[in-house]
Amino acid sequence: MLPSQTLKSNYGLTYLRAQVSEKGVAYITSVYRGKAIEHTGVRLSVGDTFVECTEPLSRQSSKHLGVTSERLNFRYGTDGGIMDFIASAQGDINVKLTGKHPVSYTLRREDASAVVKTLELAKVLQSIESVQAMRAEAARHIEFIERSRERFEGDDKPQE
């Protein structure tokens, strides 16, 4: 995770956090802190162009010392195009947290950059996973061929 995306660096802030699993699956989390807004989705826009996702993988909400923390998690591919929109957007991106009490803010450049880097890392990790899967498949084929050859060579021996 990039330093600009750590929880410690963003304590008390509302932001979008990008992450990637070791298998190359990218995620984006909408993190809101403040008075409860019960947000249900995220809408990003630049001018008249927008994308929106209202079906998160998961929702978490907590309250500590009177401050509500709400998090919506989205997986790349089912995120309504949010991550791709951020990666290709030209100009300032307006983020609107939809729900009972909508809240808007401008996406920080560091967060947009983190999304781009996360998507790049996800592609690399997916490629590694793909190569490892192909290698394992090739090893299974080689093992099958060797066992078949051993059985065939065993059948060629003269019977006594």
Image (cartoon, helix red, strand yellow):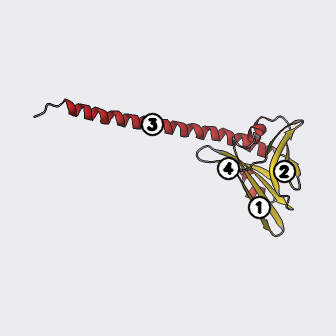
- The circle drawn on residue 35 is none
| SS for dot 1 | strand
- The circle drawn on residue 61 is 1
Of the numbered discs 3 and 1, the one sitting upstream in the chain is 1
Residue 98 x/y as whole percent? 85, 50
User: What's under tag 4, amino acid-wise?
Assistant: Met
* Residue topped by disc 4: 1
Name the quadrant of the C terminus. Answer: top left
Quarter of the rendering containing residue 155: top left
Q: Nearer the viewer, residue 126 or 154?
A: 154
* Residue topped by disc 3: 137
* Residue topped by disc 2: 97
Q: For the point 83% across and 65% down, which residue is it?
A: 67
Residue 27 x/y as whole percent? 69, 47
Q: For the point 80% across and 53% down, which residue is it?
A: 40
The Cα atoms of the two marked residues, 3 and 4, are separated by 32 Å
* 119 displayed left or right of 43: left
* Disc 1 packing (10 Å; few <14; some 14–19; many ≥20): some
* Disc 2 packing (10 Å; few <14; some 14–19; many ≥20): many
Q: Does any portion of residue 119 appear in the rendered image?
A: yes
The Cα atoms of the two marked residues, 4 and 1, are separated by 22 Å
